[in-house]
Amino acid sequence: MSDAYLPILLIFGVSALNAVFMVALSHILNPRRPTPQKAMPYESGMIPLGDTRARFSVKFYLVAISFIVFDLEAVFLIPWAVEMRALGWSGFVAASIFVAVLTAGLVYEWKKGGLDWD
Amino acid sequence: MDLGNVASLSLFYPEIVLAGTILVLTILDLVVANKRAMAYLGLAGCLVALGATVDLYGTEPTLLFHRMVALDNFSLFFKVVTLAALVGAIWMSIGSGEVRQVHLGEYYIVLLTCGFGMFFMASANNLLMAYLGLELVSLTSYILTGMLPHNRRSAEAALKYLIYGGVASGTMIYGMSWVFGMAGSLDYATINAAMAEGGGNQIALFMAFVFILAGFGYKMAFAPFHMWSPDVYQGAPTPFTGFLSVASNAAGVAILIRFFYPAVSTLGQEGAWAFQALPALQWTDLLVALSIITMTWGNLSALNQRNVKRLLAYSGIAHAGYIMMGLVVLNNDGLNAMLFYVVVYLIMNLGAFLVVMIVANATGREDMDAYRGLAWRGAAFPAVCMMVFLASLTGLPPMAGFIGKLLLVAAIIEGQFYVLAVVAMINTVVSLYYYWRIVKTMFLDEPAPEDGPVAATASAMPLLGALMVLTIVLGVYWAPLLDYTTGSLGFFMP
Amino acid sequence: MLTEALTTSALLFVIGTFGVLVRRNAIIMFLCIELQLNAVNLALVAFSRYVGVEGQVFVFFVMTVAAAEAAVGLAIIISIFRHYRTVNVDNFNLLKW
């Protein structure tokens, strides 16, 4: 089985070597004449203001928290959707109750102000 | 009996009442401005659920929801304990100054949800259900611990609890995954059958059980998984600390017994309730060692604590060690003593935390100095109650704690675990020192000039009185409780 | 195949446990816990190929609980960040670690 993947491994190896070789070669051969303009992030653009590693607003975390919770909804709905015809109406009712409970949670979050941006 | 989903609902009404209360509170939280009313509604919901649980008591052992949940007297007993702890905790919260600062609506919803999770810890008949119950309790506990606003201690305790809890539950399900792989099922009865045939690699199986024990032991604050307990006790709001100390411990005992008896032991002779540990798993020696380490570590660490909540946390670890003694003897007497001790511990420890809350309400402090001359500063009744609770926690004669400890020690002496019995005795003497240091501070020390009078929280008094009376009455007339625990040992055996 | 999957899972689990013990950044510690849970998921899926579908159902629930735990955990980490302006656990000194 592993024989079939040998060419892929070869390609990975060759491309990795190639990349390393190119970078190393340009590093060795190029002449270095540094000027302040060349050291800037955008050579002919605006001068950047402040640190780029700014902290994200805490509001993003709130959205992230909501996202991971509701994201998991799909994990439970997909198995039901795949076998929907076999499960019939009882499966539909169960899935509906599940979605209804999640909706109640969403309404609660909404009313509590968890979705307000400001 | 083995019921399906819809048929199970008719035997599931305590849970339905509790879940209904939680949902109603969630809706009310959005529309009602007066959050205090929610406490009373939660209290009413718990009392109705308590009535329903008592009503169900004595029904024929049944498996609900396709063998996921067991309904037997054992699970009903722990549901009663959980609901009693919930009622106590809500009552405490109504009078607590600390709780007044938090978002009251969410506080009660999450507190009730925590109790709801304990229901499933007590009645799980499947590793999946045990895991879900345990996680429901854990997640709600993290939230409640970190709920105090603008309080660094509370936030820090919550983070610590979260990280320890996450590692413990991760370790536990890793063990569960191995048990699943070797037994081929998550159902306790099937696991038991597979173990009895000697299925699986013995060493791997033993490791898996140690991992699972880590998760359960962490809920009970069991050495060496107890590190979270002192900090969480200290950081969390006091009514929740009281609830956590008794209910989390009880739920841990329940999940442990249900796992170690129906799942990995076999019933020796029918009727006598003698069990045999499966040859694949000689877990009794392991549990004896853990029990000795837990009680000794807890007691020795408690010796030089200045914060009373922290001291009670270490004493709680020691008590977890005492309770564990009952598990190793593999018979009915040991289990009976464990259940008895769980009830007694509930009463006396909740009482002790109630006094801590009263003092904290009046002085805003929890350290030993706040208790200086408490009896002479207008809080004679709480001081006397505290003395009763501490005497009971030590295990002194006319109190309920004495009977509890006596039953445990009697069971292990009968099972010929003499070393364990001697260690337990020595530990009791050690604990005498730190418990009575509090009593001495309350009664014999002169109040310093800066110690103001302590106004006792009026709403907490009836509960305090009731707990004190129960502590003394159960020390003298324990037969009804013992009958109740004996009757509660009806497992659903495979 | 089972051996390979279980070895990978054990390795992941050890990395996760080690990470929690060694790293001092609360969020990284939290990620290491998630790594432990994923190790468990891998073991469960590998086992369930041989012994039954129950393991896959367990995986769904582990994932759900992990998401809930992540939500609660992030909220707690944010609340502690507001107090300390850092998430390094060595700086949290009110309680003994």
Image: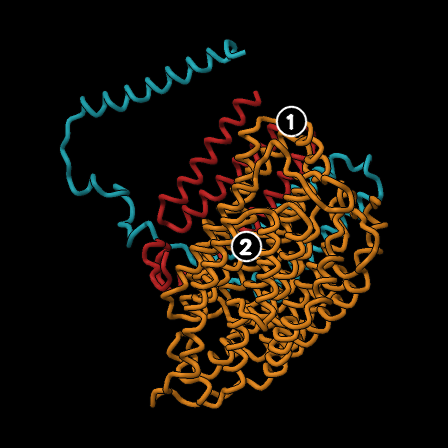
Residue farthest to the left, as pictured: A33
**Chain A shade in the render:** cyan
B401 relative to B301 in the view: left or right? right
Which chain contains the residue that carries disc 2? B
A95 relative to B208 in the view: left or right? right
- The answer to which quarter of the image holds residue B276 is top right
Q: Position of residue B320 (x, y in %)?
A: 53, 56
Near mark 2 (Cα within 10 A), the count class, few <14, some 14-19 or many ≥20, is many
Q: Is residue B164 visible?
A: no
Which chain contains the residue that carries disc 1? B
Q: Position of residue B323 (x, y in %)?
A: 57, 56
| Residue placed under numbered mark 2 in the picture | B220
Chain assigned red: C
Q: CA distance from mark 1 to mark 2?
A: 30 Å
Marker disc for residue B428:
none
Q: Is residue A40 visible?
A: yes
Q: Is residue A54 above or below residue B352?
A: above
Q: Is residue B466 above or below residue B167?
A: below
Compare residues B231 and C44 and report the one nearer the observer: B231
Q: Residue at x 32, y 58 (%)?
A: C91
Q: Amino acid at mark 2?
A: Met
| Residue placed under numbered mark 1 in the picture | B199
**Chain B shade in the render:** orange
Q: Amino acid at mark 1?
A: Gly
Q: Residue at x 32, y 54 (%)?
A: C90
Q: Position of residue B354 (x, y in %)?
A: 54, 75
